[in-house]
Image (tube, rainbow, N blue to C red):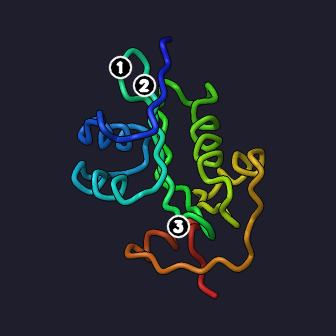
């Protein structure tokens, strides 16, 4: 393996990133949509092996109060190797100085994030465009 890290999006192929999310599997994320959300995110992290995109993530941040980690994905061939943990840690490091760093965890993955220092919130509330799906998969619950 020849792993390299990139903290900007200057050389990102958005179609390759879209494919990464599909195989991760984290659903369908269109290339144009990914370009928009990564461009509007303060912090980014991309991981390559021999020039092939194998991981990525981003953080929306306001520079002081809140940094929200999102869209962290690792290619299935590299899952379990510590790449995901390093992406999260990199985004946490970039977010230092913010009063809070938050993320949404997929149901069943909370233990992974606890090992990285995250605590479960009791007060988080959300409105999702795909509310029915989020209720079915356990991300949302009715109050």
Residue appearing at x 65%, y 77% in the figure: 124
Question: Viewer-proximal residue, 15 or 36?
Answer: 36
Q: Are marks 3 and 1 in contact (CB under 8 Å)?
A: no
Q: Earlier in the sequence, mark 3 or mark 1?
A: 1
Residue neighbourhood size for the residue with mark 1, other residues' Cα within 10 Å, grouped as few (<14), some (14–19), many (≥20): few
Kindly state the secondary structure of the residue where label 1 is placed. Answer: loop
- Which numbered disc covers residue 62? 3
Left or right: where does residue 126 sit relative to residue 39? right
Q: Are marks 2 and 3 in contact (CB under 8 Å)?
A: no
Kindly state the secondary structure of the residue where label 3 is placed. Answer: loop
Residue occupied by mark 2: 48
Please state the total of marks drawn on the protein image.
3
Residue appearing at x 74%, y 76% in the figure: 122
Q: Closer to the observer: label 3 or label 1?
A: 3
In the rendered image of this protein, does residue 68 appear above or below residue 82?
Answer: below
- Which numbered disc covers residue 51? 1
């Amino acid at each position: 393996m020849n792993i390299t890290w990139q903290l900007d999006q200057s050389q990102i192929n958005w179609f390759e990133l879209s494919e990464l999310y599909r195989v991760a599997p984290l659903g369908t994320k269109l290339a144009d949509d990914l370009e928009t959300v990564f461009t509007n995110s303060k912090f980014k992290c991309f991981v390559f092996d021999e020039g092939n995109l194998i991981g990525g993530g981003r953080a929306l941040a306001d520079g002081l109060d809140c940094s929200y980690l999102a869209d962290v994905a690792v290619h299935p061939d590299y899952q379990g190797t510590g790449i995901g943990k390093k992406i999260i840690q990199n985004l946490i490091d970039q977010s230092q100085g913010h009063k809070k760093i938050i993320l949404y965890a997929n149901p069943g993955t909370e233990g992974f994030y606890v090992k990285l220092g995250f605590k479960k919130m009791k007060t988080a509330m959300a409105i999702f465009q795909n509310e029915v799906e989020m209720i079915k998969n356990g991300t949302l619950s009715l109050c």
